[in-house]
């Protein structure tokens, strides 16, 4: 069942791989970290349904952050927003008012 779920995810990812031509696809979540069958199913479908030029250097790997991938990503986005050049430039104006 896990491998079949991976194939279903891989069929959707194949279209994205063909369009964006990424070097790496990172799979997050508990199933990707625990079961080797999910990434295997994803790889199977992506390599079967994608153009060979799009998969020439493609790597499909489970996330190293495991179940905390979403929280880590959200934290990074918040930090990048808070410390963006535009926000840093606005800080003195907010402090003065």
Image (cartoon, rainbow, N blue to C red):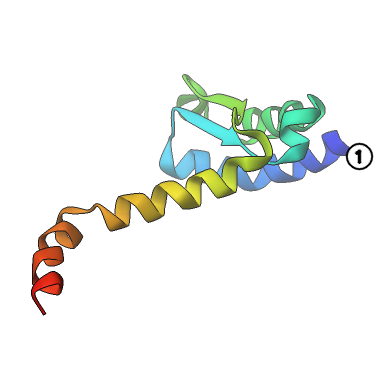
Give the position of the N terminus as an image quadrant. Answer: top right
Along the viewing direction, whichever of 71 and 52 lies nearer the viewer: 71
Q: Residue at x 46, y 50 (%)?
A: 75
52 vs 29, left or right, is left
- Determine the secondary structure under disc 1: loop
Rendered position, 11 above or below 86: above
* Residue 22 image-quadrant placement: top left
Rendered position, 86 above or below 40: below
Furthest-right residue in this view: 1
Q: How many marks?
A: 1
Furthest-bottom residue in this view: 97
9 vs 76, left or right, is right
Pointer 1 local density, CA inside 10 Å: few below 14, some 14–19, many at least 20: few
In the rendered image, residue 69, in percent from the top left (x then y), is placed at 59, 41
In the rendered image, residue 26, in percent from the top left (x then y), is placed at 56, 34
Q: What residue sits right under mark 1 in the picture?
A: 1
Q: Residue at x 75, y 26 (%)?
A: 40
* Residue 89 image-quadrant placement: bottom left
């Amino acid at each position: 069942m896990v491998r079949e779920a991976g194939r279903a995810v891989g069929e959707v990812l194949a279209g994205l791989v063909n369009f964006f031509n990424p070097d790496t696809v990172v799979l997050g979540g508990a199933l990707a970290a625990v079961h080797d069958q999910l990434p295997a199913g994803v790889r199977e479908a992506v390599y079967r349904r994608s153009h060979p030029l799009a998969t020439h250097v493609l790597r499909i790997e489970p996330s190293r952050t495991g179940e905390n991938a979403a929280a880590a990503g959200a934290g990074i986005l918040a930090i990048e927003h808070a410390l963006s050049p535009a926000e840093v430039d606005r800080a003195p104006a907010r402090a003065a008012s």
